Image: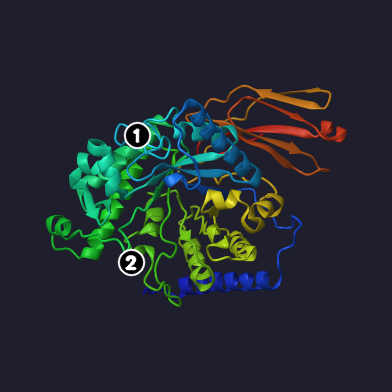
Amino acid sequence: MQHLSPSPLRSRLCFLLTAISLALGLAAHPLPHSPATPQVPYEVRAVWLTTLSGLDWPRRPARTAAEAERQRRELCLMLDRMKQSGINTVLFQARIRATTAYASDFEPWDGVFTGTPGRQPAYDPLQVAVEECHRRGMECHAWVVAFPICKVAVAKQLGWRALPSRRPELCQKCGDQWMMDPGVPGTADYLAELCAEIAQNYAVDGIHLDYIRYPEPGIPFNDSRTYQRYGQGRNKAAWRTDNVNRCVKAIHDAVKAVRPWIKMSCSPVGKFADLSRYSSFGWNARDAVHQDAQRWLREGWMDMLLPMMYFDGIHYYPFLADWKENDAGRPVVPGLGIYFLNPREKDWPLLTVQRQMQVARSLALGGQAFFRARFLLDNEKGLCDWLRTDFYATPALVPPMTWADSVPPAAPHVRQHMEGMRLHLDWEAVADETPVSYNVYRIDPNFGDVLLATRLRATHFDTLLCLPALKYSRYVVTAVDAYGNESLP
């Protein structure tokens, strides 16, 4: 149980009472269908795109060139719909179960793309995901599943290419699957090299760590020998926490050494620890699975957290406030279990998710993340429609990483000309130490200021104006560095 000084306790109660009163108020007064929700200029709007077993994508393996092209088209259509729904960040599952969705010198290809584990597909899925996200002005983060390895049967199919065959000292057999052992010092080095390889070879905007924790009790994980060898008589719980910390720091250091602007994030268990008035009922990040995630923010090892808050009521709101109070000035983006909207799951009403999102925004959390893409794009209970027409009615920029760098690039010099009702803008590329993209705005006192395009990689923008009066609006372009710092127009 945490012991809080009086001032933090009052602050916690203030957050908690605000959250609960907002939740009750929203429950009593359902949200209107009109886009009346107050908008925000900066917010992470993320979705997990799962490639494990093709849960989100790809739906079928590709054994021919035509089928591979169909896979690519399916991904592009999904990204189109995400963009239309207001999503600005895609968490693309790149390391799946010690198998990959990208070309790696460390690990074999996952079988989901070709139907055969280890077989190289006709294209590079991560490369395509990065390029297509950037084409649509969205960030693409490589989602890396840290400690779980493939099933024993898949490892046999992969043979010498399987991690348990190549690096058996890093692996533990747990029933019908393999797991990496965080207590072995080489595990941190291996994962750091793996993530640095992604940072070096792909223009990802972030590395997102999943399952960077010890296994839950249901998995028969036995690290007694590892503890006997490396524990040196320390408290085992503290030793395990230090092991995970070592992995997180090693990955952070390796990635930032390659490209310091790449965002480091992870998805810890949704409740950090027991609160003074609310129990986590034995399932929390810090004490149950040794994820000291709030420390990772304070130490700067994480730029953002996306806690898996797949619950509601007292299991959600008090712990949401706790994450906000301990965010160390960095975005904490609650991960929302939108799969519970499905009738085959918990059949939540849409209002449950709407209420969670409204309260999170009112408490100035860093945004929202949806688990997972298929349920968003299937428009469960009308969620996608509501996002597009109300909660995400206007675009939002991803918050800048001002703790890492706060100096914006130079402003671009823009040339504008009209051809009938078609507006043409072009500008010279802005030089900076990081990759630069561009935002385009319309400034108009009569029609309102509008963000027309985000994170353009090209140095031109064309659009067809829908009203003659818009010819006389002011159109401006800003340069944005890879940290998210935006120039003057």
Distance Cα–Cα, label 1 vs label 2: 32 Å
Neighbour tally class for label 1: few under 14, some 14-19, many 20 plus, Cα within 10 Å: some
Q: Which mark is residue 287?
A: 2
Q: Position of residue 438 (x, y in %)?
A: 61, 32
Q: Position of residue 480 (x, y in %)?
A: 57, 35
Q: Quadrant of residue 439?
A: top right
Instruction: Tell me the element at label 2.
Output: helix
Residue at 50% over, 70% down: 318
The residue type indicated by label 2 comes to: Asp
Which one is nearer the viewer's eye here, 9 or 203?
A: 203
The residue type indicated by label 1 comes to: Glu
Which one is nearer the viewer's eye here, 281 or 80?
A: 80
Q: Is residue 107 above or below residue 274?
A: above
Question: Which quarter of the rendered picture does the N terminus lie within?
Answer: bottom left
Q: Is residue 419 above or below residue 361?
A: above
Which tag, 1 or 2, sits closer to the chain's start? 1
Tell whether 77 sits left or right of 258: right
Question: Which quarter of the rendered picture does the C terminus lie within?
Answer: top right
Neighbour tally class for label 2: few under 14, some 14-19, many 20 plus, Cα within 10 Å: some
Residue at 62% over, 24% down: 459
Q: Position of residue 376 (x, y in %)?
A: 58, 51
Tell whether 36 sits left or right of 270: right
What residue is pinned by disc 1? 197
